Image: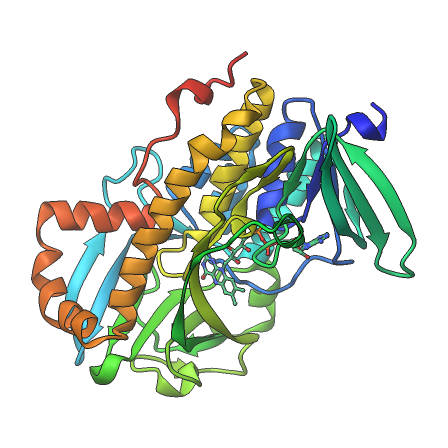
């Protein structure tokens, strides 16, 4: 295949790697370029949901995730030293009735290894600096990050898996409408002792709108350096480790970050022969652990459509699903973070009893586990 016939994926985060893997397994390994010389060591996304495990079964990656990660069986919501609401994932999925705690760094390693085993190659140190639709495909300017040598390549289609700051989105002038929370959120991954049950995620609500989220971090590289188990502590106030309620820090954090929470989605996921998946297409808060998982589902749908020659259906099939997830996660995030008096009232007085209602309970569990929609039935078999 000469380079004009070879599709291009830009970005080797989980979504670019996932799309490349799904395509390589069909014998259609695309070219993959990544501007970073080495993979990011940061945990970032922390949980793999049942839908992702289903999609990664045939590659063997799901089995490796299960072997490395730790099952999370539910979530507890705490206030004033009491559990005010509890969710259990029991029965949500016949094979995978849990989320698996496993860091994004570990996931990227597993996906890269599977991609390479399927014949794919990741070209690191290569950045896309320009792209435009041309007759019969896309023209792309690629630059080596160590010296700036440039090359112009042609490809039949391009998948931007470049993350939230997608250069392709900016170059094509695609809008990215949505909202951002006024307050930054803060996270730390640190070793903790005397922490709460580690097979649950925990959310602590305090008066005045503060919340704190805690879940185990399972990362094969970072865990080796720490003496106590690593946890993610995330909240909407600075210095989350100093504000912990039910745990003691047992060593320096391995990663700290502060970030602005936004909920946005592209006005289209396809412009000519340029397509968008993952954070390049949509962003939302980490509540619900959907970011990486939703992006991997985009990647799977995209690869199935390539296989069946129906790429023109990608935006129509995918954007409505992504938009609905972004809206739901925004609603849950507004309630969890209690930014307004209304949402503080809801989380304090409405959540504890409403979560006992089967409909509310089922909806919350589906949002947290990625099982809030079905995959399009007519592409599941690949259309061969
Ligand atoms: C601080 C933080 C905490 C988070 N916590 C969670 C969490 O707890 N749970 C959760 O589900 N999600 C979380 N996320 C979100 C999650 O990390 C993303 O949803 C996920 O990374 C999306 O994957 P992606 O492959 O679409 O994009 P990315 O992971 O951003 O990967 C994009 C890749 O493209 C490369 N790239 C970009 N532009 C170019 C270019 N022009 N040329 C070549 N390469 C390029 C980048 O170097 C990068 O490797 C968090 C994110 C952050 C930043």
What is the quadrant of residue 317 in the picture? Answer: top left
What is the quadrant of residue 198 in the picture? Answer: bottom left
Q: Is 359 on the left-hand or right-hand side of 317?
A: left
The image quadrant where one finds the C terminus is top right
The way the protein has been coloured in the rendering is rainbow
Residue extending farthest top: 384
Whole-percent x and y of residue 10?
Answer: 69, 45
Give me the residue at 19% from left, 74% from top. 344
**Above-or-below relation of 124 to 29:** below
Q: Is 152 on the left-hand or right-hand side of 355?
A: right
Give me the residue at 51% from left, 35% from top. 56
Residue placed most toward the observer, 347 or 78: 347
Q: Is 265 on the left-hand or right-hand side of 79?
A: right
Residue 368 is at least partly visible in this image? yes
Whole-percent x and y of residue 167?
Answer: 66, 54
Give me the residue at 82% from left, 48% from top. 142
**Above-or-below relation of 289 to 216:** above
């Amino acid at each position: 295949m000469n380079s004009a016939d070879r599709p291009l994926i830009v970005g080797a985060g989980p979504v670019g790697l996932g799309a490349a893997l799904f395509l390589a397994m069909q014998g259609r390994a695309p070219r993959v370029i990544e501007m970073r010389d080495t993979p990011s060591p940061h945990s970032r996304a922390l949980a793999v949901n049942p839908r992702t495990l289903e999609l990664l079964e045939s590659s063997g990656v799901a089995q490796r995730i299960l072997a490395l990660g730790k099952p999370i069986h539910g979530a507890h919501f705490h206030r004033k030293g009491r559990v005010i609401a509890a969710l259990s994932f029991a029965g949500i999925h016949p094979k995978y009735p849990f989320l698996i705690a496993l860091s994004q760094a570990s996931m990227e390693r597993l996906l890269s290894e599977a991609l390479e085993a399927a014949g794919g190659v990741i070209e690191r140190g290569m950045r896309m600096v320009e792209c435009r639709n041309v007759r019969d495909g896309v023209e792309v300017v690629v630059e080596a990050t160590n010296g700036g040598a440039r090359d112009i390549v042609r490809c039949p289609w391009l998948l931007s898996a470049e993350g939230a700051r997608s250069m392709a989105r900016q170059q094509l002038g695609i809008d990215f409408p949505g909202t951002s929370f006024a307050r930054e959120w803060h996270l730390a991954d640190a070793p903790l002792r005397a922490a709460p049950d580690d097979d649950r995620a925990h959310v602590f609500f305090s008066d005045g709108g503060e919340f704190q989220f805690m879940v185990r971090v399972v990362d094969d590289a970072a865990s080796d350096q720490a003496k106590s188990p690593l946890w993610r502590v995330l909240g909407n106030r600075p210095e989350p480790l100093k504000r912990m309620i039910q745990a003691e820090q047992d060593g320096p954090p391995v990663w700290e970050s502060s970030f602005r929470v936004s909920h946005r989605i592209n006005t289209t996921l396809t412009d000519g022969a340029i397509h968008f998946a993952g954070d390049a297409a949509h962003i939302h808060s980490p509540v619900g652990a959907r970011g990486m998982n939703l992006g991997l589902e985009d990647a799977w749908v995209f690869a199935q459509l390539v296989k069946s020659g129906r790429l023109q259906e990608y935006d129509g099939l995918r954007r409505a699903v992504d938009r609905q997830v972004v809206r739901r996660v925004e609603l849950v995030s507004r309630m969890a973070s209690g930014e307004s008096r209304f949402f503080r009232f809801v989380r304090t007085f409405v959540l504890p009893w409403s979560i006992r209602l089967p409909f509310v309970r089922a909806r919350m569990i589906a949002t947290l586990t990625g099982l809030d929609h079905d995959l399009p039935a007519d592409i599941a078999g690949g259309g061969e």
